[in-house]
Image (spheres, helix red, strand yellow):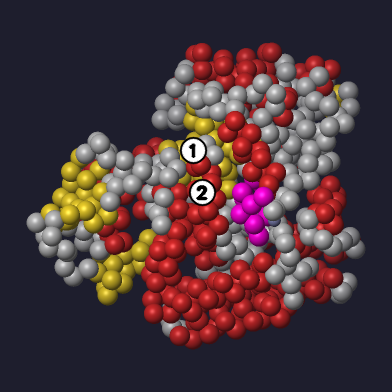
């Protein structure tokens, strides 16, 4: 068999999806364009990847297909266009993509779902995947090629101090590469991502030289990779040696909005490292892009920091409020993230800004509602107007029923699709004649979330402490009504199950508030969740992690605020006072 290319794939997909179209290359176009000529479809495109996107757009527009979920194409025969317009002309006009970079952030290893994820991304014109280096190590050459053919650039990066300088290799010969805490060098455990606090002695010149050497070596070994990153291990804990200590002020603490009031700001020490490493890397290999992260206690550009060519910042509005758009000046939380973003925009000097999104809520993937349809369109327009080059979001396939609509619409918003008609079209595609009933259900879900008060950060306590069980029972009834209109529909079945879960989760929360919840109640809920592994509602291992902690708290008689981490709990309680008006 001859080697597959993007072009041969585009042809194959035409046959698979019943798209009869001719292809034309036109490098003057900003994107694909679909035309009617002599009763046939013509896809004109500036390159093969756009051509492939054009094929999928035709399959959705004329072929009766909807590419809503990975691995599950929806085909509705009644949506197949019987006849093309007789007149020659443009059917789907070319349009410059709103954002250049549109993608996913994969926080899990590659596996059985990898092909369907890449496939879905191409079908929805997503072109970027940010993944941890340790996971990229296990991606087969075949799947790298599979992504490349589909126009997906993979960034091997994310939290990675411990990838560049693993403790197992460097701790013995170079203890001085590692952070000094309380006058002693830490002994890295090799388990930094769990301990959240193992950093490097980042001012050490030998360490810096070694990181650059490792990066260049990595670039040689992975010529297919064009973007790598330099991002601290998750968590805090910078080096406290005399030299490193000059780069931060212990008394200058982080901010409440960025969940870092318990630690000092580390922007100066981090950016000093990034700037130096980027300059040395680019002196040797200008084509290798280096990303870094704006996050927690290093959100804003420090004095003198600039985004030079070959550099990009992943700006993460980590703990943001989902009851306001990110650019809403009325939101006491998001307005800070917006200011951070503007600050990065102000220091762009040939480099780029990618927003690191959480269209699935924050950190635990607990399947709490986040209906963010119109907001994404608004936010992306604002991002582009303020110098943002890309938007990527965390995601999982196994909770697609809960957040898939965000992912589906995000892809379209990032291309610059029309807000209202795109959202309406999605409901028609997914719910047919019941589109309006379904949309009313999602409005009702949104209304409950908005009812909590001005702001809401999507962790369980923020939602459940300010809503009633009755709210979820009403939503569950609405979901069952939607299902009753078409009882065989798999998506509606799962939506009803999702609302049943919300009722159970809320009931468990209330029981805990009354000091009556037991470990066995937590286990019962967890078992119920695990009994639905055949759905796309839950990220099961995250529920295990979360509920293990909740069970421990119940067993030990400690309060369940969030995840049993003292500083985080303290921040959540402060947020209740300052943001939620409690
Ligand atoms: Zn140090
Ligand atoms: Zn808000």
Residue 322 drawn in magenta: yes
Q: In which quarter of the image is residue 255?
A: top right
Dot 2 crowding, Cα within 10 Å, few <14, some 14–19, many 20+: many
Q: Is the magenta stretch mostly helix, strand or loop?
A: loop
Residues at marks 1 and 2, CA–CA distance in whole angstroms? 10 Å
Residue 31 horizontal/vertical position (percent): 31, 44
- Residue on which disc 2 sits: 380
Image check: 27 left or right of 436?
left
Residue 514 horizontal/vertical position (percent): 87, 74
Which residue is located at x 54 percent, y 18 percent? Answer: 281
Quadrant for the C terminus in the image: bottom right
Image check: 473 left or right of 255?
left
Instruction: Name the quarter showing ligand 2.
Output: bottom right
Residue in front for this viewpoint, 45 or 278: 45
What is the secondary structure assignment of the residue under circle 1?
A: loop
Residue in front for this viewpoint, 570 or 376: 376
Which residue is located at x 54 percent, y 46 percent? Answer: 382
Residue 521 horizontal/vertical position (percent): 77, 73
What is the secondary structure assignment of the residue under circle 2?
A: helix
Residue 376 drawn in magenta: no
Above or below: residue 498 compared with residue 356: below
Span highlighted in magenta in the image: 317-329
- Residue on which disc 1 sits: 389
Q: Mark 1–mark 2 contact, CB under 8 Å? A: no
Residue in front for this viewpoint, 550 or 371: 371
Q: How many marks?
A: 2
**Residue furthest front in the image:** 329
Which residue is located at x 28 percent, y 71 percent? Answer: 79
Q: Quadrant of residue 517?
A: bottom right
Image check: 148 left or right of 182?
left
């Amino acid at each position: 068999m001859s080697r597959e290319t993007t072009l041969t794939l585009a042809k194959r997909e035409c046959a698979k999806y019943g798209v009869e179209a001719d292809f034309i290359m036109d490098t003057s176009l900003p994107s694909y364009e679909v035309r009617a000529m002599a009763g046939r479809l013509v896809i004109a495109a500036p390159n093969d990847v756009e051509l492939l996107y054009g094929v999928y757009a035709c399959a959705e527009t004329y072929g009766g297909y909807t590419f809503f979920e990975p691995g599950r194409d929806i085909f509705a025969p009644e949506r197949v266009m019987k006849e093309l317009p007789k007149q020659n002309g443009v059917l789907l006009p070319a349009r410059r993509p709103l954002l250049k970079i549109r993608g996913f952030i994969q926080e899990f290893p590659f596996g059985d779902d990898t092909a369907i994820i890449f496939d879905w991304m191409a079908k929805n014109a997503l072109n970027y995947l940010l993944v941890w280096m340790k996971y990229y190590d296990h991606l087969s050459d075949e799947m790298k090629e599979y992504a490349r053919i589909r126009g997906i650039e993979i960034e091997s990066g994310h939290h990675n101090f411990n990838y560049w300088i693993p403790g197992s290799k460097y701790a013995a010969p170079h203890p001085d590469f590692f952070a000094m805490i309380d006058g002693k060098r830490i002994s890295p455990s090799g388990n930094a991502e769990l301990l959240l606090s193992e950093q490097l002695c980042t001012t050490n010149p030998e360490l810096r030289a070694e990181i650059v050497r490792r990066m260049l070596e990595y670039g040689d070994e992975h010529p297919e990779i064009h973007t790598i990153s330099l991002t601290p291990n998750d968590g805090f804990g910078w080096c406290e040696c005399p030299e490193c200590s000059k780069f931060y002020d212990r008394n200058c603490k982080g901010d409440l909005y960025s969940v870092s009031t318990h630690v000092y700001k580390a922007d100066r020490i981090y950016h000093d490292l990034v700037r130096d490493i980027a300059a040395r890397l680019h002196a040797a290999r200008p084509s290798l892009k280096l990303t870094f992260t704006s996050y927690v206690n290093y959100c804003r550009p420090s004095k003198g920091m600039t985004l030079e060519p070959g550099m990009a910042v992943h700006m993460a509005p980590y703990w943001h409020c989902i009851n306001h758009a990110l650019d809403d000046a009325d939101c006491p939380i998001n307005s800070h993230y917006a200011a951070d973003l503007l600050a990065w925009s102000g220091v762009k000097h040939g480099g780029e800004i990618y927003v690191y999104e959480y269209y699935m809520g924050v950190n635990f993937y607990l399947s709490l509602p986040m209906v963010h349809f119109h907001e994404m369109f608004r936010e992306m327009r604002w991002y582009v107007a303020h110098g943002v080059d890309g938007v990527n979001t965390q995601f999982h396939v196994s909770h697609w029923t809960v957040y898939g609509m965000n992912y589906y619409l995000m892809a379209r918003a990032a291309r610059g699709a029309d807000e209202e008609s795109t959202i309406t079209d999605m409901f028609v595609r997914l719910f047919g004649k019941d589109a309006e009933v379904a949309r009313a259900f999602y409005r009702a879900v949104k209304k409950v979330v908005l009812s909590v008060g001005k702001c809401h950060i999507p962790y369980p306590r923020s939602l459940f402490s300010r809503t009633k069980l009755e709210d979820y029972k009403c939503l569950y009834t609405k979901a069952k009504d939607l299902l009753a209109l078409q009882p065989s529909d798999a998506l509606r079945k799962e939506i009803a199950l999702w609302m049943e879960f919300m009722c159970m989760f809320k009931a468990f929360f209330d029981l805990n508030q009354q000091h009556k919840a037991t470990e066995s109640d937590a286990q019962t809920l967890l078992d119920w969740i695990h009994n639905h592994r055949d759905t796309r509602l839950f990220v099961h291992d995250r529920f295990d992690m979360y509920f293990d902690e909740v069970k421990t708290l119940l067993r030990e008689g400690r309060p369940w605020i969030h995840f049993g981490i003292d500083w985080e709990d303290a921040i959540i309680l402060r947020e209740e006072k300052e943001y939620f008006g409690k």
